[in-house]
Image (cartoon, rainbow, N blue to C red):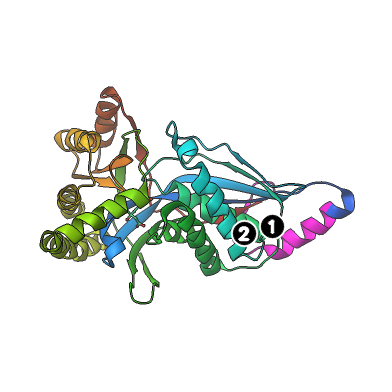
């Protein structure tokens, strides 16, 4: 098999052969998997309260390499928003411990190396992508034969290390890829996932505030605000429910103008919930003034990323205006493939 050739996720048999060969001849084979980051197009925070969200996998990926070793080690070579990896270090250790336990590999000594082009930053699903990639690489290394749904369950367990009680949208996007309509049944705790087949030719410009946000804290703050003013939040939730329904139709139809309008409305509601910040407001304004069809914060907020829906020349114009204002910006391809083993 050619090196680096991508094979389906479930490839334990050839992997087992390689492991036997490597043991016989003393060479070291590394199990490798990659998973995409994600962007939430609609519904961050609302999804925590059981409302639907729409997200998409992005082309940038995290690659995890796993190998049995004499002792446990983790080398994190992912590019990052400065300070992100340090800030998340303890959460990352907890996350990996949880995943090993969920896979029945507690106490196993492995060397994990993380890399790939996905920037470790708030809002881009960095933890979900690394959890899915690590879970798939561990599955491969230990020949566990877990299917995609089980990998998703393990990645969700890993996400708990970062987010307390995450909705699960990030690991679903990283595991399954494409466009995802996601809802969490709050009674059963089950994720209800539907892949959306979008007719839209979407181009998204991302603006990075450069600030790392703490999801557990921001989600907790929203809950406290809602407890204080339930009527206000009910109005916001009712408005969002209408947006979510219309957004699903507009994504599937590829109605970009409508999608843009709905993104703007979604952002206003998030702002009203107190999860925006000055930097995000500046980025949204820059995008809107320079031809975006719609713009909003994505992910946790209070830092992290802004996304803008664009067509044609507007993308490069907005990216350059954002860069001039001192932020990192890039145009992203979306709807990418989910987690996969790399050979
Ligand atoms: O910041 P991100 O990309 O990890 O997204 C968090 C999304 C929230 O809805 C705020 C939390 C969640 O668990 O869904």
Mark 2–mark 1 contact, CB under 8 Å? yes
Is ligand 1 closer than 8 angstroms to the Cβ of mark 2?
A: no
**How packed is label 1: few (under 14 Cα within 10 Å), some, or many (20 or more)?**
few
Q: List x then y, in percent, for residue 293.
A: 18, 44
Numbered disc 2: secondary structure: helix
> Does residue 313 appear in the picture of this structure?
no
Based on the picture, tell me whether residue 19 belongs to the magenta stretch. yes
In the foreground, 338 or 300: 300
In the foreground, 233 or 324: 233
In the foreground, 115 or 162: 162
Discs 2/1, front = 1
- Relative to 256, does residue 289 appear above or below in the rendering? above
In the foreground, 251 or 42: 42
Q: Is residue 196 left or right of residue 93?
A: left
Q: Which residue is drawn at 54% across and 66% down?
A: 148
Q: Is residue 200 left or right of residue 132?
A: left
Is ligand 1 closer than 8 angstroms to the Cβ of mark 1?
A: no
Q: In this view, does 326 lie to the left or right of 236?
A: right
Q: Which residue is drawn at 41% across and 54% down?
A: 163
Q: Residue at x 36, y 49 (%)?
A: 215
Q: Residue at x 44, y 49 (%)?
A: 37
Q: List x then y, in percent, for residue 253.
A: 24, 61
What residue is pinned by disc 1? 107
Numbered disc 1: secondary structure: loop
- Relative to 326, does residue 230 appear above or below in the rendering? below
CA–CA distance between discs 2 and 1? Answer: 8 Å
What residue is pinned by disc 2? 100
Q: List x then y, in percent, for residue 301.
A: 29, 45
Q: Which range is magenta? A: 1-22
Based on the picture, tell me whether residue 38 belongs to the magenta stretch. no
Q: List x then y, in percent, for residue 28.
A: 78, 47
């Amino acid at each position: 098999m050619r090196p680096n050739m991508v094979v389906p996720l479930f490839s334990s048999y050839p992997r087992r052969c390689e492991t036997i060969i490597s043991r016989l001849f003393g060479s070291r084979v590394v199990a490798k998997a990659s998973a995409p980051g994600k962007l939430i197009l609609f519904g961050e925070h609302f999804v925590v309260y059981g409302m639907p969200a729409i997200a998409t996998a992005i082309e940038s990926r995290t690659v995890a390499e796993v190998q049995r070793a004499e002792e446990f080690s983790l080398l994190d070579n992912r590019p990052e928003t400065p300070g992100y990896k340090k800030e998340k270090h303890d959460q990352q250790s907890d996350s990996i411990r949880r995943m090993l336990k969920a896979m029945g590999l507690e106490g196993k000594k492995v060397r994990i190396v993380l890399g790939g082009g996905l920037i470790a930053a708030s809002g881009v699903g960095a933890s979900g992508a690394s959890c899915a990639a690590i879970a798939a690489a561990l599955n491969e290394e230990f020949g566990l034969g877990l299917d995609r749904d089980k990998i998703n369950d393990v990645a969700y367990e890993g996400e708990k290390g970062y987010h307390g009680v995450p909705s699960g949208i990030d690991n679903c996007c990283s595991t399954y890829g494409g466009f995802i309509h996601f809802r969490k049944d709050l009674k059963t705790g089950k994720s209800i996932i539907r892949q959306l087949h979008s007719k839209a030719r979407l181009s998204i410009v991302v603006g990075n505030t450069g600030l790392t946000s703490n999801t557990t804290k921001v989600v907790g703050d929203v809950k406290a605000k809602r407890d204080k003013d339930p009527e206000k939040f009910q109005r916001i939730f009712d408005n969002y429910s209408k947006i979510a329904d219309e957004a699903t139709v507009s994504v599937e139809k590829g109605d970009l103008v409508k999608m843009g309008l709905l993104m703007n409305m979604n952002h206003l509601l998030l702002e009203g919930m107190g999860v925006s910040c000055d930097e995000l407001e500046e980025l949204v304004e820059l995008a809107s003034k320079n031809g975006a069809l719609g713009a909003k914060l994505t992910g946790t907020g209070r830092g992290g990323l802004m996304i803008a829906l664009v067509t044609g020349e507007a993308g490069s114009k907005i990216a350059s205006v954002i860069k001039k204002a001192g932020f990192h910006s890039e145009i992203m391809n979306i709807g990418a493939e989910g987690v996969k083993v790399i050979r």
